[in-house]
Amino acid sequence: MNKLIVIIFLSVFIAHSSFSQTRAERKQLKLEKAIKAYAHTKSLLDSGVYTFDAEWMYPRNSVQLNLVGNPGYIRIDGNTIDMYLPYRGIVRIGGGLNQRAGIYHDGELAAYTITHNDDKQTSEINLQVKTTVELFDINIKVQSKANTTVFISSSKRDAIRYQGIIIPQEKSRTK
């Protein structure tokens, strides 16, 4: 009986060690996946047609808020933008009657630049949006796996930050 247990144990140990990956192989596989994810994200951004789906909002003087029940988005299609992001913070200059509370715009972009850092596998997009009453400077930082941080500064509101993902427009949660 003892011989049988020893034989089973040795056969399992040998099979496990012969079929498992080494640390270097796992590290190489992880690096290849990261490179592939970055290439996919970079091609999506270079196409100029993508959506940022906001999942978290970080107001300046408050706690983080989950946006599951109140989704926000920024849709870029060439030189046009359609965005709605909920806002919680201080508005320094009153907007007037019948204005929506969030950050919104549907129209042309005033400025658009994109830069890729292949060494760090990140991309940075800078946008400028002019509405009839407000000017938004938007900085979008995209990691290799499409994890995204959006910083928005406004001419009449406190700055705010959003966390989410960049996806193709046809896969957006908000239509």
Image: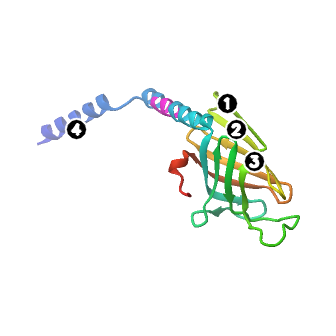
- Marks 2 and 4, the one that precedes in the sequence: 4
User: Callout 2: helix, strand or loop?
Assistant: strand
User: In front: mark 4 or mark 3?
Assistant: 3
Image spot of residue 79 (x, y percent): 70, 42
Residue on which disc 3 sits: 138
> Compared to 175, does 123 lie above or below?
above
On residue 124, the disc is 2
On residue 9, the disc is 4
Image spot of residue 72 (x, y percent): 63, 59
Say what amino acid the circle numbered 2 marks. Answer: Glu
Separation of residues labelled 4 and 1 (CA atoms): 50 Å
User: Callout 4: helix, strand or loop?
Assistant: helix
Q: Residues within 10 Å of mark 1 (few under 14, many from 20)?
A: few
User: In front: mark 3 or mark 1?
Assistant: 3
Separation of residues labelled 3 and 1 (CA atoms): 19 Å
Bounds of the magenta segment = 29-34
> Compared to 165, does 101 lie above or below?
below
